[in-house]
Amino acid sequence: RRCLLEEFDEAAYLRTLKDHIDATPDWERTPPDLYARRLEACKGCGFLEAGTCGACGCYVELRAAVAQRSCPWNKWKAAESGTTDNRQ
């Protein structure tokens, strides 16, 4: 559905986002602890804007949910090793 941001239904967006993540097959899904670390890296990144990566345009929660995905700016490398590095 095409809409302007001012017409955006945030609750519907969150439901759709959760539905997409829940539909990801278990074998393809990022383990919960790594998913949380990936999102923390995104939250500390200057490119994050309203759930979207300003650098690549992805919806970070969807990208982070798939194990084989990576951050094109290598922001998740520290998350993968369990450390934090949010330099831009």
Image: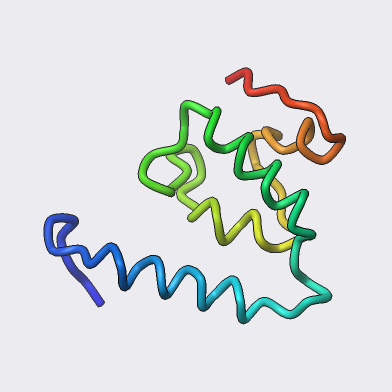
State the residue lying farthest toward the right.
81
**Residue at left 73%, top 26%?**
84
Q: How is the image coloured?
A: rainbow
- Give residue 67's position: percent from left, percent from top: 77, 60
Instruction: Name which quarter of the figure residue 54 lies in.
Output: top left
**Residue at left 77%, top 50%?**
33
Quarter of the image with the N terminus in it: bottom left
State the residue lying farthest toward the top.
87
Left or right of 36 on screen, residue 59: left
Q: How many marks?
A: 0
**Residue at left 72%, top 38%?**
76
- Give residue 72's position: percent from left, percent from top: 65, 41
Q: Say if 69 sits above or below 84 in the image.
A: below
Left or right of 19 on screen, residue 28: right
- Give residue 81's position: percent from left, percent from top: 87, 35
Left or right of 3 on screen, residue 80: right
Q: 14 or 64: which is nearer to us?
A: 14
Q: Say if 66 sits above or below 41 in the image.
A: below
- Give residue 9's position: percent from left, percent from top: 23, 67
**Residue at left 42%, top 74%?**
16
Q: Say if 39 sits above or below 68 in the image.
A: above
Left or right of 31 on screen, residue 36: left
Instruction: Name which quarter of the figure residue 42 lies in.
Output: top right
Q: 48 or 40: which is nearer to us?
A: 40
Quarter of the image with the C terminus in it: top right
